[in-house]
């Protein structure tokens, strides 16, 4: 098997971190909407925590993308 195939497989696996980020952000948003519906007066606190959580979850997807690019550029 050629090295290019392994590079492509490695980059594809690294990009799969986006799935976890998408699931995490969706679950966090769903919970935040439920919490705001139950306690509308706590919306500002809930929104702050939601944005922080979404940013951290999205960071994992960005790291996976960067790793995939590094794999392709360094090994490909």
Image (cartoon, helix red, strand yellow):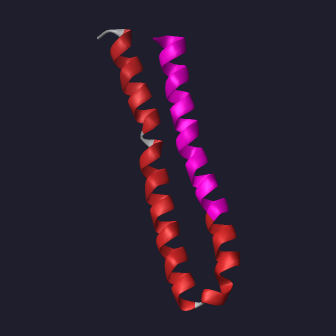
* Residue at 61% over, 67% down: 50
Where residue 42 sits: x, y (%)?
67, 84
- Which of the pair 44/16 is nearer the observer? 44
Q: Among all residues in the image, which is located at the extreme left?
A: 1
In the rendered image, the vertical position of residue 2 relative to residue 39, given as above or below:
above
Q: Quadrant of the N terminus?
A: top left
Q: Quadrant of the C terminus?
A: top left
Give the side of residue 26 with respect to residue 59, left or right.
Answer: left
* Residue at 49% over, 60% down: 24
Question: Is most of the magenta stretch helix, strand or loop?
Answer: helix
Where residue 59 sits: x, y (%)?
60, 46
- Which of the pair 5/65 is nearer the observer? 65
* Residue at 49% over, 27% down: 68
Where residue 47 sits: x, y (%)?
64, 71
Where residue 39 sits: x, y (%)?
60, 90
Quadrant for residue 66, please give it: top right
In the rendered image, the vertical position of residue 70 relative to residue 60, given as above or below:
above
Give the side of residue 45 with respect to residue 34, left or right.
Answer: right
Q: Which residues are magenta?
A: 51-76
- Which of the pair 72/51 is nearer the observer? 51
* Residue at 55% over, 75% down: 32
**Residue 58 magenta-highlighted:** yes
């Amino acid at each position: 098997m050629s090295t290019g195939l392994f590079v492509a497989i490695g980059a594809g696996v690294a990009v799969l971190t986006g799935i976890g980020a998408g699931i995490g952000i969706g679950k966090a948003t769903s919970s935040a909407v439920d919490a705001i519906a139950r306690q509308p007066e706590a919306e500002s606190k809930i929104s702050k925590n939601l944005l922080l959580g979404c940013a951290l979850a999205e960071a994992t997807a960005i790291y996976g993308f960067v790793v995939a690019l590094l794999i392709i550029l360094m090994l490909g």
